[in-house]
Image (tube, rainbow, N blue to C red):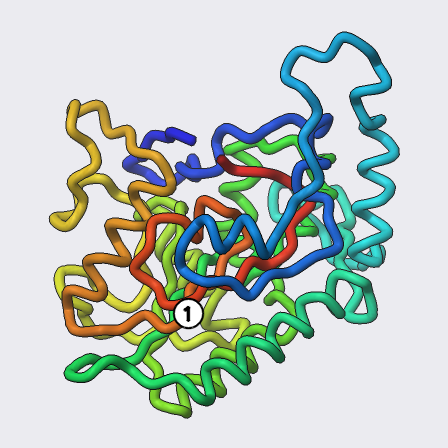
Amino acid sequence: MTSRSTADGTTPTVRRRRLPAAVLTVVAVAGLALVGSQSSALSRAFQPVPAPPANPTSSNQIQNIDQVRTAIKGYYGDTPTARLDPVDGTTTLHEASPDSAYAKEVGRLEKSASGYLTGAHAAQGTKKAVLLDVDDTSLLTYDYEIYSNFAFNPTTNAAFVNKAVFPAVFGMPQLVQRVEQQGYTVFFLTGRSEGQRAGTEKNLTDQGYPVHQAAVGKNVDNVFLKDVTHPWSTCDTTGDNVCTTIELKSETRRYIESLGYDIKANFGDQFSDLKGGSADKTFKLPNPMYFLP
């Protein structure tokens, strides 16, 4: 998808446009994939449920929205909490269960990733690295999706982001800490805007992820956020501050590797997080809540 950056960080820039709930079935699958860096390998290893037609001729071609929402809640093990929303403090939040089908699938992926990374070696003359998306790869946004009834709103989403309230994806901080101890450099790459850096980094740190306050090339640290004015960004060829997710993320990975890193694994919950190369293997986390082309 295409998206625009904001100067004040109040509007997340990659998730502004999402497919409506009626087509959530495109990613409502019980599958995870450990796949090669080529998109053809990715598509062979991970086959999503076919999306409904853009112009259906019968209601039978469209899954009922309420049924999809119910299935998603069951998959995540929807659990009410006593926590209040960070928008106006009037709504109690829900969370995913560590015993859910979602948590178990993520656990299997993490086990596969851990085994692969334990035996992986960097190319000669490079430093081995792993790269992770943030939303629903490192931090779990299920509480926001239930709060918003799966309808993305940039203002309310910004409140969740800037207040740093998201829990970690089950088991992911432990995996990241383990591979860092094995000598990997850890990078985060997100479609959140630069204006949301403070909330993003606080949330990552609070959940046990390594955020290192040391420059990485021309980036301030190991967390890369969206800004088409970054010196390594060349996808905005028309001056309208618009690039696709695939363009932005792939060129950032290329930039990281140009600094002497070998990205052994790229983790993401969207195919657009993973396409474009510059990673030896890609790990697709499940996310039936929304789809970003």
**Residue 290 can be seen, yes or no:** yes
Residue 231: x and y, percent? 12, 48
Residue at 45%, 58% (x, y): give it: 133
Q: Residue furthest top?
A: 57
Left or right of 254, for residue 107: right
The image shows residue 92, relative to residue 264, as above or below, that is above
Residue at 35%, 83% (x, y): give it: 184
The image shows residue 215, relative to residue 199, as above or below, that is below
Residue at 70%, 25% (x, y): give it: 52
Please give the residue where the numbered disc 1 appears in the rendered image. Answer: 265
Residue 191: x and y, percent? 40, 46
Residue 67: x and y, percent? 87, 34
Left or right of 76, for residue 165: left
Q: Residue 140 sits in which quadrant?
A: bottom right
Residue at 46%, 49% (x, y): give it: 40
The image shows residue 148, relative to residue 249, as above or below, that is above
Q: Residue 80 sits in which quadrant?
A: bottom right
Q: Which is more toward the observer, 275 or 209?
A: 275
Residue 125: x and y, percent? 15, 83
Where does the N terminus fall, quadrant-wise?
top left
Count of numbered tags: 1
Q: Residues within 10 Å of mark 1 (few under 14, many from 20)?
A: many
Q: Residue 117 sits in which quadrant?
A: bottom left
Left or right of 124, for residue 71: right
**Residue 165 can be seen, yes or no:** no
Q: Residue furthest bottom?
A: 182
Secondary element under disc 1, as helix, strand or loop, is: strand
Q: Which is more toward the observer, 285 or 172?
A: 285
| Dot 1 amino acid type | Ala
